[in-house]
Image (cartoon, rainbow, N blue to C red):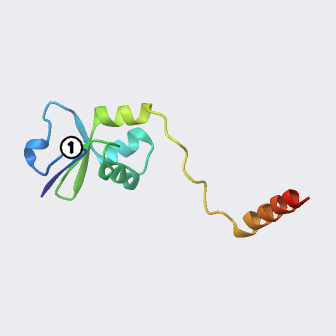
Amino acid sequence: MLKDIGGNGVSSKNIDPEREYIPTPEASRRSGLSKVHIVRLLKTPGALEGFQLGRDWFVYTDSLEKYMTSPHKPGPKGPIKKGVQKRSNETSTKESNS
């Protein structure tokens, strides 16, 4: 089973033999991203280019380098505490009523 991710189509002819590729554990070591996050990026169209061969995922090194040099928005820092959010809403409501 071979899936081309980042391109269009599912076939072995979509693997570019001219491009260097690495398995996700190596991509994880080079980038500092988790293996799960790299696979998620591979499945997101346009984020990272690579392919799946059997159950293993491979990333084109030029695509990984391009992704790492482009700016990214920081993700959430953790769950929002309901108590803190509620208090800040109450404060802003009191201030706008004054």
Residue drawn at point x = 15 percent, y = 30 percent = 18
Q: Is residue 42 left or right of residue 8?
A: right
Quadrant housing the N terminus: bottom left
Residue drawn at point x = 23 percent, y = 54 percent = 56
Identify the element where label 1 is drawn.
loop
The residue at the far front in this view is 97
Image spot of residue 14 (x, y percent): 12, 42
Closer to the camera, 48 or 60? 48
The residue under label 1 is which amino acid type?
Gly
- Res 90 quadrant in image: bottom right
Residue drawn at point x = 9 percent, y = 47 percent = 12
Q: Is residue 76 left or right of residue 14?
A: right
Mark 1, other Cα within 10 Å: few <14 / some 14–19 / many ≥20: some
Position above or below: 58 against 95 = above
Q: Is residue 38 left or right of residue 22?
A: right
Closer to the camera, 23 or 47? 47
Closer to the camera, 50 or 89? 89
Which residue corresponds to mark 1? 7
Q: Is residue 47 left or right of residue 83?
A: left
Residue drawn at point x = 14 percent, y = 36 percent = 16
All told, the count of numbered labels is 1
